[in-house]
Amino acid sequence: MEPTTEPTVGAQPELRPGETATPPHRAGGGARPALWVSVAVLVFDQITKAAVRALLPVHASRTVVPGFLDFTHVQNTGAAFGLLNAAEFPFKAALLALVATLALVGIAAYAARLSIHQRVARLGLSLILGGAAGNLVDRLAVGYVVDFVDVYWRGYHFWAFNVADSAITIGVSLMLIDMLELGSHASKTV
């Protein structure tokens, strides 16, 4: 009888000198698509903000959809949804930039721990990461975030927002969807 040369199920392939085994959950460079999404959000966010700065004076508006949507140039010196916008205290811009940086590092660390199979969560975190980076660039470069999308209905106005904020909102929604699906697929062993 001749010896078989077929690998057994679950066996690792032979490695050449200098090669290292890639863990199954990291195979295929799964982080790359996530990084491209983040970079695309960051670039698109910065392009739209630069256009608003160049074409629309601060507090000026241009109607996009009458009675529903305007582009209004707003400088948000506060946090999300204008929180702390009216508050003035020493080193406010630096403190908000530091908090945003720490959040960005935490998001990146969490994203690195996700399995390649958690596509919805990876996409959600990629959007959040790109959006957070876009707003951080504004804070570091000019000390405020440019918001310009003004959605309203009759007398009600939603907070002005931007592309980065939209990416963050969609990303959080995808993360929630992923969490709900993971909970529904949990094993039912006793």
Image (spheres, rainbow, N blue to C red):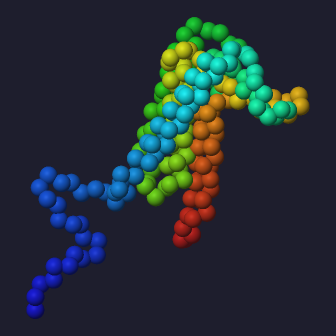
**Residue furthest toward the top?**
90
Q: Quadrant of the N terminus?
A: bottom left
- Left or right placement of residue 164 versus residue 74 in this view: left
Q: Is residue 26 above or below residue 45?
A: below
Q: Position of residue 22 (x, y in %)?
A: 28, 56
Residue at x 48% of width, y 26% of height: 101
Q: Nearer the viewer, residue 149 or 51?
A: 51
* Placement of 28 over or under 143, stated as above or below: below
Q: Position of residue 98 (x, y in %)?
A: 50, 21
Which of these two is toward me, 31 or 104? 31
Residue 76, placed above or below residue 28: above
Question: Which residue: 48% across, 28% down?
Answer: 102
Direction right: furthest residue: 154
Is residue 160 shown to the viewer in this render?
A: no
Rendered-image quadrant of the C terminus: bottom right
Q: Which residue is found at the position 50% from the left and 38% from the top?
A: 40
Image location (x, y in percent) of residue 64: 76, 31
Residue 174 relative to residue 28: left or right: right
Which of these two is toward me, 85 or 38? 38
| Residue 90 makes an appearance in the image | yes
Above or below residue 17? Residue 189 is below
Quadrant of res 2: bottom left
